[in-house]
Image (spheres, rainbow, N blue to C red):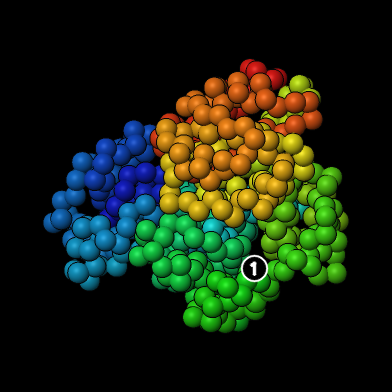
Amino acid sequence: MAQHLVVLGAGESGASAARLGQREGYTVFVSDAGRGSEQYLQELATAGIAVEIGGHTEAELLRADVAVKSPGIPETAPPVVALREAGIPVISEIEFAARFVHPDATVVGITGSNGKTTTTLLTHHLLHMAGERVVAGGNLGDSFARLLLDHAPQDIYVLELSSFQLDGIVRFRPQIAAVLNITPDHLDRYNYSLDAYADSKLRIAHNQHPGDHLIVLQDAKTIAPARRRNPTRAAVTEITPATAIQGSTIQVGAQTFALGTGQLRGRHNAMNALFAVQIALQLGVSAEEIQLALDSFRPAPHRMELIATSDGRTWINDSKATNVDSTYFALEAMTGPTVWIAGGTDKGNDYSPLHKVMGDKVHTLICLGLDNEKLKETFEWVSRIEECQSAADAVQLADRYAGVGDTVLLSPACASFDLFKNYVDRGDQFRASVQQTAG
């Protein structure tokens, strides 16, 4: 008799897990407390998979042999509690998909508080340009399950992994795992414990074998204690930016790579490159192939994205910087007079670490949000502070105050939900306004 799979959440990862389960012979039921997404509901209907929206029918959930929950659903959600109390395993889509990967394939897992997306995309680019059969996804783009459904079998899967996804693993094992950094984020899901959040990140290495590799940032404050609490059998490589980054070059083992010939700007992207290059070298890519790929890489939209203009100023869309740590690295990368656009939904931010990287570079702060008082009070020493409530107005103000040779940096340090659908919407509106104003 076929096993019964229940999927909580009818979004991208839920719909993909449901379809993968169907392909692998499960009977499948999808349940979403909300309205679901029209796109994915249609996808499930086309596949003939039963779905309920607007609530959960407990009797239907408890028919499961195994349940997959979307990463946004917390452990404390009533359906998750009910399933666990009934002794039904509740796992993540990452865990479920990993059970159907070809045993000869290599899985690369990349996690961290900041830089996951760029490092994942750069790793994929280095491998793809070297001729490897590789796809990337997970917490970006296509879910792991969708990669298995909609792509031909690959030799390498490069996965961006969030702590929420890692919370739901049981046997998931990446042959190469990377922990880029750990800084406070999403602590409301971890009882406001940084240790608990760090332990979640280190789960990436729980199932690694002695022949596997774990690459971590050398960090005595957070990562080293988390490693002691979460021992691994994998070989461990520590990344030490203080000695490995020299201006616009990075040193990985005996090899030196130039970043100034491409579009990887700033120390944070140099750190991302250290991890990506280390992974590529471990997978047999030559130093020559890596350098050519570094030269041709283009960062993803909304992540220190350089907007092409012809007005003599540099406009950068870093809308993905939704926390202070990300904005710290963006401001650190500024080398001249800067107009900084920041603000949005404050997540209890402590902005004080930004003072030392701002120096006298930021001559104008444009606060883009409904409530800007905290930003204004923290940075009252900046010579000019303006407020607005739309991307178009922010660009008009920046156009007024940025001189030739200046940089205009959108790096909000805040979530976007006060004025925008999400960080993508914020970045798209900013880019469109810049192109109209300064293009």
Q: In the picture provided, is 133 more to the left or to the right than 13?
A: right
The one nearer the camera, 89 or 201, is 201
Quadrant holding the N terminus = bottom left
The one nearer the camera, 15 or 213, is 213
Is any atom of residue 109 visible in this view?
Answer: no
Q: Residue at x 65, y 77 (%)?
A: 236
Instruction: Say what secondary structure mark 1 lies in.
Output: strand
The one nearer the camera, 418 or 4, is 418
Q: Residue at x 54, y 78 (%)?
A: 225
Q: In the picture provided, is 75 more to the left or to the right than 79?
A: right
Q: Residue at x 24, y 67 (%)?
A: 84
Q: Residue furthest top?
A: 436
Residue where numbered disc 1 is placed: 217
- As drawn, 179 above or below 339: below
The picture places residue 49, in percent across and down from the top left corner, at: 29, 44
- As drawn, 174 above or below 337: below
The picture places residue 171, in percent across and down from the top left corner, at: 44, 71
Q: Residue at x 41, y 60 (%)?
A: 187
Q: In the picture provided, is 161 more to the left or to the right than 363?
A: left
* Amino acid identity at mark 1: Leu
Quadrant holding the C terminus = top right
